[in-house]
Image: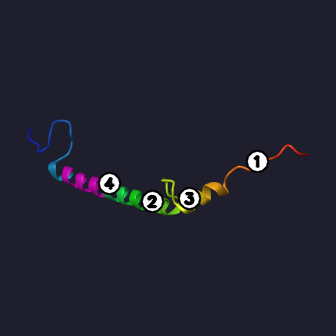
Amino acid sequence: MSDDRIAPGTYMTPDEAKEFHKLFVASTAFFVFVAVVAHFLVWQWRPWFPGTAPYKAGLTATAPLHVTGKA
């Protein structure tokens, strides 16, 4: 039995392996691109390193209210 499989147990021919690798690389690149765009947009919305004025203003605006004991 002579077939052109890459290695025992892979069940792929070299052409199938190249096609799978091409699809895998393309989908990984697309995923990384989407992740980078998402991180950039979140960074523009709310930076995760404190110190910028809009971020500090957002923190003080959401501070809990202190209620006095007078009734």
Q: Look at the numbered discs 3 and 1 and tell me whether their residues touch, using CB distance below 8 Å.
A: no
Residue at image x 32%, y 54%? Answer: 28
List the residue tagged with mark 3. 55
Badge 2, how many Cα within 10 Å: few under 14, some, many 20+?
Answer: few
Dot 1 and dot 2 residues touching (CB under 8 Å): no
Label 2 and label 3: CA atoms lie apart by 19 Å
Instruction: Look at the picture and state if 70 lies above or below 58.
Output: above
Segment tinted magenta in the rendering: 17-26
Which residue carries the number 1 mark?
Answer: 66
Q: Residue at the top extreme?
A: 8
Query: Is 35 placed left or right of 58 in the picture?
Result: left
Question: Comparing marks 3 and 4, which lies closer to the viewer?
Answer: 3
Judging from the image, what secondary structure is the residue with disc 1 in? Answer: loop
* 35 left or right, relative to 18: right
Predominant secondary structure, magenta span: helix
Q: Where does label 2 land, which residue?
A: 38
Label 3 sits on a secondary structure element that is: helix
Front disc: 4 or 2: 2
Instruction: Please name the residue shown 41% across and 62% down the image.
Output: 37
N-terminal of the pair, mark 4 or mark 2, is: 4
The reply to whether the C-beta atoms of the residues labelled 1 and 4 are less than 8 Å apart is no
Q: Which residue is mark 4?
A: 28
Eye-nearest disc, 1 or 2: 1
Classify mark 2: helix, strand or loop. helix
Q: Earlier in the sequence, mark 3 or mark 4?
A: 4
Q: Quadrant of residue 7?
A: top left
Q: Tell which residue pokes out farthest to the left in this image.
A: 2
